[in-house]
């Protein structure tokens, strides 16, 4: 591929990327806002004990991730969800 | 008749040295305007009148690193002149117990200047704290490696992949909303939490990739430390050598050139800095780069811009040959040396064929380690760039009877051991788009971080903080494009400050110091075509009649007049210049060689490419 063709291709890709990033902004913001409502709906159906367990699980999972124990984190996640 | 009336060694009056009678002064001007007055050898002998040899030997042993004064005074009627020299101990020879010989260099002369200039290096001035960081010039550059097109596309493809993954994660939120009645609240809460965690991580990856894209597409301007030859010359001449000033004169665009010309030495370890206002590295040239010592520095400028030099009244002059300073200060009127006299044996005259040329090549060096320096050579479709790096001027007879008998044969070449900087001129819409993307990413990042605060109960303390997207690119326009931070051939450019106070390469610099511009504005002084040397006087070309070994009446007053300026006018108003002059002090005549303008070379045309 000639240098100019490569230049043109990368220019086109960059223009598309710019459009993708612009579109993504609205999309992600809207989704995160609706996720807040979803979280409220989910927690409304959970007992206080379940919510407490959920937070404990998330903290433990994140600790495992931070210490690089990804395999253990994955196992913990599967165990938690299946139970 | 002039006579020597006084001799001094180290300021002390003494007796005449051997052969003091009939002292001949040989003034050699060559192409310069000021005479070279060195004396190759003076014999000192101890005698009943004085111990001259013993005195000189003692002085030599006391301080062999520095010549002591030797002078004599000449009187001619009411005209009195001191001839001040200093002893060049590098030539001292002990001929006997009571006899030695030593050469002399004229004090406050170009000889003295040139002799010392060879020993003054940039490193020496740095060691003496005469050159400090404040004297160096930031040299802007951007690394643009043309081999990374494929890498750029790969980076963009990766960015698209991340975008796609973010979209999938966002879609998960919708799926969780629809699935949670069936999968249960606990699993839905966990899935939502993991999705919300992954989104900022994915954004961080996207930001990282965009930063890499920035580095590949829009490298940030960096600044090497460099030096202006004007700074080096002024610091050397005034601060180191103790002269009272330097005058660069005025002709055409020379004042702009000497103010702005900047030399960036070859770099093999140093990476430029981001801040243009904080020069912390040394900007001196590499010792292998021409111009590292004062002599080479000014000689390079002389060759490139057709300069002449002189030391007059403790001031060093480095001016274009076309500067009217030279001619307007010449006051000697050549007596009417009639051609008939040459027939009577008083010298000869001839056309200066030795200065005639058939082609004149001006070329900057290219740099294999930086392909940008070859751009002008390979881009045959760009009319504006032709002649920047190499320029060829040819001279041919207009009418020719036989090509085999044409007498224009020699070529001239000016090799400039620097690579002409390649200015970054593009300021394209892609760059604007990139800055816009940077703004969007920063806004998006702030939005996402704000939204995620609402989920801190789910995310715990692990809510990641994303890095700021780097979009501070500065102004790349006007920087020097290079293949990488290091280059083996030093670079030259004209620099000025932009509105932000950052140094940039002057937009039309190649039209001022490019190879073609050098010929048209400076080196065409050597052209035989009327109007090239002096547009205001078509009789002044490189064509001259050279008169040699002509005997003229000459006295001390005449010598004082021509000593610092070899230009003269003839009795019928023509301009001429001495080449050499032999004057025996006690005789009222001199044997001289000189030239007078004469456009004898006709039937020629000149083409430049």
Image (tube, rainbow, N blue to C red):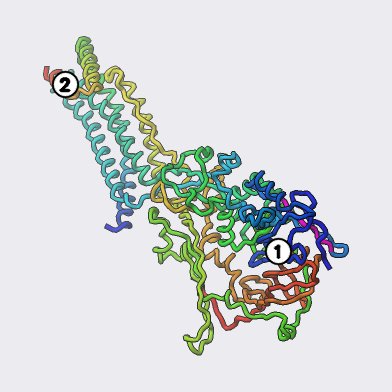
Q: How busy is the neighbourhood of tag 1: few (under 14 within 10 Å), some, or many (20 plus)?
A: many
Q: Nearer the viewer, residue B86 or B195?
A: B86
Q: Residue furthest left?
A: A82
> Where does residue B592 sit, x and y in percent of width and height?
71, 73
Position of B304 relative to B461 (above/below): below
Q: Is residue B114 visible?
A: no
Question: Magenta includes B74?
Answer: yes
Q: Are marks 2 and 1 in contact (CB under 8 Å)?
A: no
Q: Chain of mark 2?
A: A
- Residue at the image point whose x is 47% and y is 54% from the top: B421
The magenta-colored residue range is B69-75
Whether residue B181 is situated above or below residue B603 in the rendered picture: above
Label ID, residue A72? 2
Q: Which mark is residue B111?
A: none
B54 displayed left or right of B293: right
Residue pointed to by mark 1: B326
- Between circles 2 and 1, the one closer to the viewer is 1
Image quadrant of residue B167? top left
Q: Position of residue A40 (x, y in %)?
A: 26, 19
**Placement of B259 over or under B335, stated as above or below:** above
Q: Main secondary structure of the magenta part?
A: strand
* Percent of width and height locating residue B61: 65, 45
Of all residues, the one furthest to the right in this rendering is: B78
Tell me the distance, in whole angstroms, between the alpha carbons under discs 2 and 1.
Answer: 89 Å
Q: Chain of mark 1?
A: B
């Amino acid at each position: 591929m000639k240098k100019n063709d490569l230049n043109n291709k990368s220019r086109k890709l960059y223009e598309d990327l710019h459009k993708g990033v612009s579109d993504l902004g609205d999309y992600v913001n809207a989704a995160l806002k609706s996720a807040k409502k979803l979280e409220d709906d989910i927690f409304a159906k959970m007992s206080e004990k379940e919510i407490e367990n959920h937070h404990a699980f998330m903290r433990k999972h994140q600790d495992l991730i931070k210490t690089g124990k990804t395999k253990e984190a994955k196992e913990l996640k599967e165990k938690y969800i299946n139970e | 008749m002039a006579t020597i009336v006084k001799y001094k060694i180290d300021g002390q009056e003494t007796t005449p040295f051997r052969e003091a009678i009939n002292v001949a002064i040989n003034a050699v001007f060559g192409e310069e305007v000021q005479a070279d007055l060195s004396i190759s050898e003076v014999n000192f002998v101890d005698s009943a009148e004085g111990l001259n040899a013993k005195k000189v030997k003692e002085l030599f042993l006391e301080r062999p690193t520095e010549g002591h004064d030797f002078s004599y005074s000449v009187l001619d009627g009411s005209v009195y002149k001191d001839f001040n020299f200093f002893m060049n101990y590098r030539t001292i020879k002990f001929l006997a117990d009571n006899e030695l010989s030593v050469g002399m260099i004229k004090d406050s002369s170009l000889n003295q200047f040139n002799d010392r200039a060879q020993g003054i290096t940039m490193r020496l001035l740095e060691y003496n704290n005469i050159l400090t960081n404040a004297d160096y010039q930031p040299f802007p550059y951007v690394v643009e490696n043309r081999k990374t097109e494929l890498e750029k596309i790969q980076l963009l493809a990766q960015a698209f992949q991340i975008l796609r993954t973010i979209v999938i994660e966002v879609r998960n939120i919708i799926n969780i909303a629809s699935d949670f009645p069936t999968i249960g609240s606990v699993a839905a809460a966990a899935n939502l939490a993991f999705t919300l965690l992954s989104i900022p991580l994915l954004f961080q990856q996207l930001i990282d990739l965009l930063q890499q894209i920035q580095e590949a597409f829009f490298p940030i301007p960096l600044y090497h430390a460099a030096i202006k030859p004007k700074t080096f010359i002024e610091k050397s001449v005034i601060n180191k050598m103790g002269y009272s000033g330097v005058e660069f004169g005025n002709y055409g665009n020379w004042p702009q050139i000497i103010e702005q010309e900047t030399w960036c030495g070859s770099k093999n370890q140093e990476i430029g800095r981001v801040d243009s206002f904080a020069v912390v590295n040394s900007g001196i040239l590499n010792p292998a780069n021409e111009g590292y010592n004062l002599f080479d520095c000014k000689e390079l400028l002389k060759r490139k811009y057709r300069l002449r030099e002189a030391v007059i009244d403790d001031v060093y002059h480095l001016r274009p040959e076309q500067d009217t300073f030279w001619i307007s200060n010449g006051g000697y009127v050549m007596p009417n040396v009639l051609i008939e006299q040459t027939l009577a044996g008083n010298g000869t005259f001839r056309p200066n064929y030795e200065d005639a040329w058939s082609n004149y090549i001006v070329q900057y060096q290219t740099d294999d380690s930086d392909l940008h320096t070859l751009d002008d050579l390979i881009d045959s479709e760009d009319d504006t760039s032709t002649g920047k790096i190499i320029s060829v001027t040819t001279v041919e007879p207009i009418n020719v009877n036989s090509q085999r008998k044409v007498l224009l044969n020699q070529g001239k070449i000016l090799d400039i051991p620097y690579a002409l900087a390649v200015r970054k001129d593009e300021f394209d819409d892609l760059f604007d788009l990139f800055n816009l993307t940077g703004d969007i990413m920063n806004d998006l990042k702030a939005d996402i971080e704000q939204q995620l605060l609402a989920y801190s109960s789910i995310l715990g303390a692990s809510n990641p903080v994303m890095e700021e997207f780097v979009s501070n690119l500065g102004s790349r326009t006007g920087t020097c494009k290079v293949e990488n931070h290091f280059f083996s051939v030093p670079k030259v450019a004209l620099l000025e400050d932009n509105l932000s106070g950052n140094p940039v390469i002057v937009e039309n610099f190649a039209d001022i110091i490019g190879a073609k511009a050098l010929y048209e504005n400076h080196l065409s002084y050597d052209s035989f075509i009327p109007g090239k040397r002096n547009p205001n006087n078509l009789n002044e070309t490189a064509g001259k009649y050279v008169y040699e070994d002509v005997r003229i009446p000459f006295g001390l007053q005449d010598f004082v007049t021509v000593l610092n300026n070899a230009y003269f006018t003839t009795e019928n108003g023509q301009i001429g210049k001495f080449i050499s002059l032999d004057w025996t002090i006690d005789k009222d005549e001199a044997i001289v060689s000189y030239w007078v303008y004469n456009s004898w070379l006709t039937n020629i045309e000149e083409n430049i490419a």
